[in-house]
Image (cartoon, grey):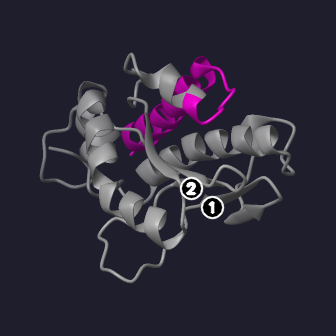
Amino acid sequence: MCRLCRSHNETTDHILNGCPKLSQTDYKARHDKVSAAVHWSLCKEYGFDHSSKWYEHRAEKVLENDIVKLLWDFHVQSDHVIEHCRPDLLLVKKKTKEAVIIDIAVPGDVRITEKEQDKILKYQDLKREIKTVWQLRKVSVVPIVIGALGTITSNFRRYLDSVSCKLRVSNLQKTALLGSAHILRKVLEI
């Protein structure tokens, strides 16, 4: 049995992706590192202050200039009850009146395709709401999903390109993998 939760078999997959004792701490830290790397790339692309190295970046909640507004883990207020209203990143392009909802996940490697589809479906209500309320021409949802061991889908590079993320895929994979290695080391040393 798992040495932390004592309710599931202790497998590598359980430790990396399924232990309830790690979900709000270690899994979130791994997820936030990947999110911060994407945020760093967007800061660099749109002229915001950023650290010189992507892996040292600390994301700010709200960044805005004449071109875009970039929101990090921001609760979007609406007139209607929307279950999923806090995407990881929300990029609003002011001149073209477009927005991109970017949501990031680091699931088990066998679940990456399913997770990509879930992310797109999850934000359809928010997509419609902000298009209407913020009077935008276009709103799209972009899932950035990397398996805990670095697996990606064939759509991954296309999704990164659609948000002008210039990071190498291998850097994002490395971030997820290093987070997973940290989790394994921590648990197996108990």
Q: Residue furthest bottom?
A: 79
Amino acid on which the number 2 mark rests in the picture: Leu
Which of the 4 image quarters holds residue 106? top left
Task: Say which mark, if any, is on residue 127.
Answer: none
Which of the 4 image quarters holds residue 178? top right
> Is 48 above or below relative to 53?
below
Amino acid on which the number 1 mark rests in the picture: Leu
User: Residues in magenta?
Assistant: 162-190
Asked whether the residues under the numbered discs 2 and 1 touch, taking CB atoms below 8 Å apart as contact, a structural biologist would say yes
Asked if the magenta segment contains residue 185, the reply would be yes
> Is 146 above or below relative to 86?
above
Q: Position of residue 36 (x, y in %)?
A: 64, 46
Query: Residue placed at 75% from the left, 61% from the top?
Result: 63
Secondary structure mostly seen in magenta is helix
Res. 90 in view: yes
Instruction: Say which of 169 and 124 sits in front.
Output: 124
The residue under label 1 is 71
Query: Residue placed at 54% from the left, 59% from the top?
Result: 136
The residue under label 2 is 90
Q: Position of residue 152 (x, y in %)?
A: 40, 21
Q: CA distance from mark 2 to mark 1?
A: 5 Å
